Amino acid sequence: MKHITFYLDVVSPYAYLAFEQLPEALRGQSYAVSYKPVLLAALLKHHGQQGPAEVPGKRAWTYRQVLWLARQQGLDLQLPAQHPFNPLALLRLALACGDSGYPNRYVMETIFRHVWQGGGDAADPERWLALSEHLAPKRDVNDELARAQLRANTDDALALGVFGVPTFEVDGKLFWGLDALPMLKAYLAGDTWFENAWDAADQVRNGP
């Protein structure tokens, strides 16, 4: 059985779509998943990038595309009232619900759907309170442990070379993006393509 670490941030619609699609996309494979919340904004800052919603033109395209992709998946995705938003409280809530900093699938599903279904304000304090009461976290979401875990998760991701979400790590290999799910399935299935082609990408010289 392979172990997958799923790096995610609930601010990303692509992370949500990948989360919902994962069980069907990997059907028939033997694997276990750990969900690891990270702060996408910190990844982008580290790599000197902007998020799709921060680039004019790309912002509108991103929302149109995710609505289309959700329709293709049969998901009732509705854009939040405001985006991007500060996801810190939601990420810390997810971590506070886990025994060892890894929230289970139900917790992540509930928080993702809080953001990407219903069209509400994902960061609204009253909605957050209702969500927290529903999930009943095991620890105080505002204590230093939850904050430290989020920082540690993000630092671990950066050390591995993660530059965006969703990213799936297995056997030290990183698979980035919703559209990487078929590639991830092929790796889990033992596709021999990975024996040579994977490392070939590292041999290409950087141009001027």
Image (tube, rainbow, N blue to C red):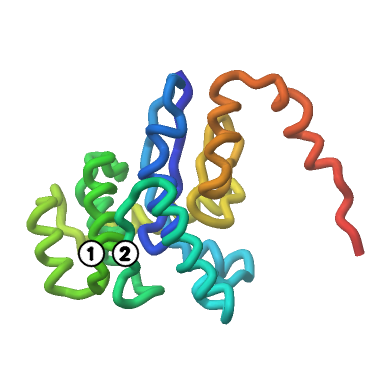
Vertical relation: 100 (above or below) 59: above
Marks 2 and 1: in contact by CB < 8 Å? yes
Q: Position of residue 49 (x, y in %)?
A: 61, 69
> Would residue 21 appear left or right of 187 to someone viewing this image?
left
Q: Nearer the viewer, residue 181 or 97?
A: 181
Q: CA distance from mark 1 to mark 2?
A: 6 Å
> Would residue 3 appear left or right of 194 to someone viewing this image?
left
Q: Please report the residue visible at 31 percent of the width from the left and 42 percent of the height from the top.
A: 102
Query: Can the viewer see residue 128 in this picture?
Result: yes
Q: Amino acid at mark 2?
A: Gln
Q: Position of residue 180 (x, y in %)?
A: 57, 42
Residue 134 image-quadrant placement: bottom left
**Number of numbered discs overlaid on the protein picture:** 2
Residue 123 image-quadrant placement: bottom left
Q: Please report the residue visible at 31 percent of the width from the left and 58 percent of the height from the top.
A: 91
Residue tagged 2? 78
Q: Please report the residue visible at 61 percent of the width from the left and 50 percent of the height from the top.
A: 161
Q: Amino acid at mark 1?
A: Gly
Which quarter of the rendered picture does the C terminus lie within? bottom right
First in residue order: circle 1 vs circle 2:
2
Residue 83 image-quadrant placement: bottom left
Q: Nearer the viewer, residue 27 or 152?
A: 27
Q: Which label is found at residue 118?
A: 1
Q: Which label is found at residue 166?
A: none
Vertical relation: 49 (above or below) 37: below
